[in-house]
Image (spheres, grey):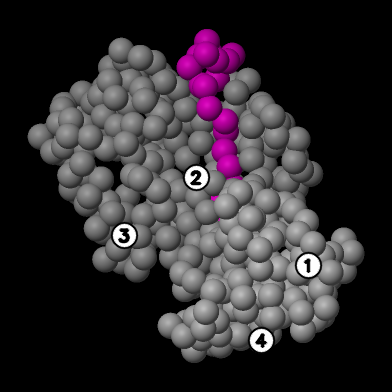
Amino acid sequence: MTKLAKIQAALEDRNMEAVLVTSDYNRRYVADFTGTTGMALITPSKAFFVTDFRYTEQAAKQAVGFEIRQNKGPIFETVQAIIAELGIQKLYFEEAYVTVAEHKLMQSFFSAKLEPFSDLFEDMRKVKTASELSAIKTACEIADEAFTHILTFIKPGLTELEVSNELEFFMRRNGASGSSFDTIVASGLRSALPHGVASDKIIEVGDFVTMDYGCYYNGYCSDMTRTIAIGEPSAKLKEIYAVTLEAQLKVIDALKPGMTGIEADAIARDHIASKGYGEAFGHSLGHGIGLEIHEGPNLSMKSPNVLVAGNVVTDEPGIYLPGVGGVRIEDDILITETGNEVLTHSSKELIIL
């Protein structure tokens, strides 16, 4: 069954007469359209993609199974023509992405009653298809190659920004379309900042350097973190590195279908707490990745969602000690029918340069 057929079957099961997809990521998901302008209108038996003259040829190639309609005036005017043509009485819109102003504009154009919906496509996106997994795995391979490269580049005297830029340039040179988020390079005392985006701080001997980065490949993300030492680190930094790595590996040993996000998070959290650093692990264990760098399912103390085969999640425990430094270690992990497959393969043993 094609992705479009699955979507249409889901609409029929939910008794949804028609949905209008306007958000960028869900539009890409439902129609495989990579342009910047367009809307998809889907019913249980028909599918239309509306865009302007710049993208009609592209949409015809990418949006397989959709009838392409070109809007020559306001796009909502062309959508209304489809609504009238099909006699649609109730049109569902993405409540999480439509602004109040856009909703008012829709009401001014559409004859159908507008009804909000949420999570339909987001839930479907949690389980990756073979083509999605292929793109994610390639994005992970590029991230791994970038780590190997940066070990030959990083040295005392460079700024965090110089390291960040080198990571990003390398990934682009090796097939990535761009970074999947603002690259984090946090060194020395700044490594205690969980989201210490790269600054002009100079990397010094004795620093821990945490690098959290990833890239887009064919629309899909990778997200990897490694912490390394520049010169011999302190005994305390070595200790928290060991505890973090133990927690991260315990999660990998246990992750499998049927486990909840709460249970996965507890594996790392309980271990870190048992070593006396519970208060120093203040964020969730992980999150899903795909078209977006943060999507479902989540691995956290508040995530009862059950993992299933096809989910791709991060495993990223950390310990952060203000005035000392911090550690985070992160892999991207595919949940399989029998357990899991780690998609990022860079060494996690403490590297001292």
Q: Which callout, 3 or 2, points to the residue nearer the camera?
A: 3
Q: Nearer the viewer, residue 239 or 175?
A: 175
Q: Earlier in the sequence, mark 3 or mark 1?
A: 1
Q: Disc 1 residue type?
A: Ala
Q: Is residue 192 left or right of residue 317?
A: left
Q: Secondary structure at mark 1?
A: loop
- Asked whether 214 falls inside the magenta stretch, the response is no
| Residue furthest front as drawn | 108
Q: Which residue is mark 4?
A: 67
Q: Secondary structure at mark 2?
A: strand
Tag on residue 171?
3
The reply to whether residue 246 is visible in this rendering is no
Q: Which residue is mark 2?
A: 331
* Residue 112 - label: 1
Between the residue at mark 3 and the residue at mark 1, the CA separation in whole angstroms equals 47 Å
The residue closer to the viewer here, 243 or 308, is: 308
For image coordinates 66% across by 45% down, the residue present is 297
Residue at (66% x, 68% y) in the render:
109
Q: Which residues are magenta?
A: 272-290
Vertical order, 106 against 353 (above or below): below
Of circles 3 and 4, the one toward us is 4
**Magenta segment includes 286:** yes
Which of disc 2 and disc 3 is earlier in sequence? 3
Task: Give whichever of discs 2 and 4 has the lower sequence position.
Answer: 4
- Find the distance from the CA under tag 2 to the CA under tag 4: 40 Å
